[in-house]
Image (cartoon, rainbow, N blue to C red):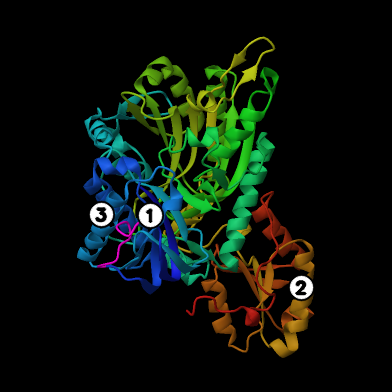
Amino acid sequence: MRLLFIHSDHLEFEAREKAGPDDLAETEGVPMEGRMEECVTAFISVESDDQEDLDGVVENALTELRDVTGQLNTNNVVLYPYAHLSEDLAGPDAAKQVMQDLEVALEDEGFEVLRAPFGWYKSFEVACKGHPLSELSRHVAHHRDEEKDVEETDREPSDWQVMHPDGSVEDAVAAKADTSDDMRAFIEDEVEDIVASPGEEPPHLQIMKEKELVGYDELSDVGNLRFYPRGKLIRDALMEYVNDLVVDYGGMPVETPIMYDLGARCIDEHAGKFGERQYRFESGDRRMMLRFAACFGQFSIMRDMHISVNDLPLRIYEMSTYSFRREQKGEVTGLKRLRAFTMPDMHTATEDMDQAREELMKQAKLALQTSEDLDINYEPAIRMTREFYEENETWVEEVVEELGKPALLEIIPERHHYWSAKIDFAAIDGLGRPIENPTVQIDVESAERFDIEYTDGTDQYHPPILHYSPSGGIERVMAALLERTATMDTPQLPTWLSPTQVRFIPVNPDEHLDYCDQLTDELEAADLRVDIDDRDESVGKRIAEAETDWVPYYVVVGGNEIEGDTLGVNVRAEGEERDMTLAELRETVEADIADLPQKARYLPRYVGNHPNFTGN
């Protein structure tokens, strides 16, 4: 069965003329015209294979409809027979039976259903909502992959250990008492399957709303977020930071399509190899797939390149701003688990496993550099097959020594993934739950699958390929940053990520605003983000607002400051006021920023002109 789902403002149809013999067209028990508002329109082609088990295909189609209507938060469904989705159609009796049974099944579950008649030429009007998931295409079979489910549950469990920088190894659970609080929480979640603070909402959800950084968009799919100016500035700065980091390391930026033709060989043969189901779209007569990550595009580039052994290691990098995950409605969690996310993604083609291991160690260390730059603690987990571990135990010890901290080891009895070894890094949120961010993996399958080769001038070889994200998803980095603030005595973001870095508060805006403008001009000339609280409020209230906005440096400006040479700068992290000249203030802020990205202010200079985005 082929299904095309359209999230519709409305669908309206009218049966005009029978499409064949009289006994082909439905005439009873179904309306000849109809209209439904705010619905999911399901265009359906029943295929010949479906005739082997009509009940099975109805049940699986019902599962897909539950999923889609749940994502789109609607209970209204239009069932519309549409032969144009397939060239291998079932017989009319089977197709009519499927449509009728599907209607009954949906109504039994409480759905409001409008079914268009089978066997008629119909005029119809559909108004499609304009969001990324308003058009979805699915292929439903009559059978279930039960053997795979049994295989998953029968697998031998992993062996979990903790390796210390001195090379010593102990059982992970036994090691808990001698590890850090974060590693202890990581072990409890990964090894013992203990959910910390069950039922509680991670602190960053409230913070992102209160600080007007990010919010859910009710007009979009569940789990899709909108970024307000402060949040977008943080996200953009993080993206620039990762871009600079990777390019400096040797990554070569590219940009690949978001949509792929399902008929293209390299995509059609390998769709789904990476453990996620892709969103599919109809575009004219072409079936398309919306990718989940940048792997396909970068592999396509590598496949079409002439790669010499002298080019290796070859690092192709993309900031994938359109990556998606099919999180279910109850699984989305703020910036931690969301439907659409931004993923820095680099793939490195290497000459052999020796070079792959060398690159993995370098890239793992680069991931820890992001830990320092972002002031986020990351706990490492090294995951590998038993065969890989036994062949590379000394190398694993060297990796842990280089990381300089205990690492959780997951030793997998047999390889069930495209990778043979990977290192994940996790921050621990305010509830004691891991947020996995940077990752680097050795891929031993994809080069052959995607026909990626390099030459030494004589022969062709398939290179081991590393998948690498030095930061993990940008939104998850933001989640980790906000979760960290929830545990701080004086919560604030690093200065380079603070939407406002310096704020001036004129005692009397009528008298002191011009001087604040002069100070702001000078600091903005040094590329600092500065604003002025010009509102007709008490000084105390405006100071409180600077604290609420987590402004790291703010200055109350009155007559003394205009006449003198120094400013009384409130240094929020220290909880005290320090006398500084304007030059000293600039140098202090610049020292905080160091060589990290510095973006211009995203909100107006005057706080009085800052709109309220959330109604708080």
Q: CA distance from mark 3 to mark 1?
A: 13 Å
Residue displayed at 26% across by 67% down: 28
For the residues labelled 2 and 3, the Cα–Cα distance comes to: 76 Å
- Residue 44 - label: 1
Q: Residues within 10 Å of mark 3 (few under 14, many from 20)?
A: some
In terms of sequence position, does the residue under pointer 3 or pointer 1 come before the other?
1
- Above or below 512: residue 95: above
How far from the left and from the top, in percent, is residue 342?
54, 51
Q: Where residue 143 sits: x, y (%)?
A: 27, 40
Q: Which quadrant of the figure has residue 563?
A: bottom right
Magenta run includes residue 34: no
Q: Tell me if 530 is positioned left or right of 227 in this view.
A: right
Q: Secondary structure at mark 3?
A: helix
Q: Is residue 22 magenta?
A: yes
Q: Which residue type carries mark 1?
A: Ile
State whether residue 17 is above or below residue 236: below
The one nearer the camera, 226 or 446, is: 446
Tag 2 and tag 3, C-beta contact below 8 Å? no
Nearer the observer, 573 or 399 = 399
Residue under pointer 3: 97
**Residue at the outermost left position:** 108
- According to the picture, the residue beneath numbered tag 2 turns out to be 519
First to last magenta residue range? 20-29
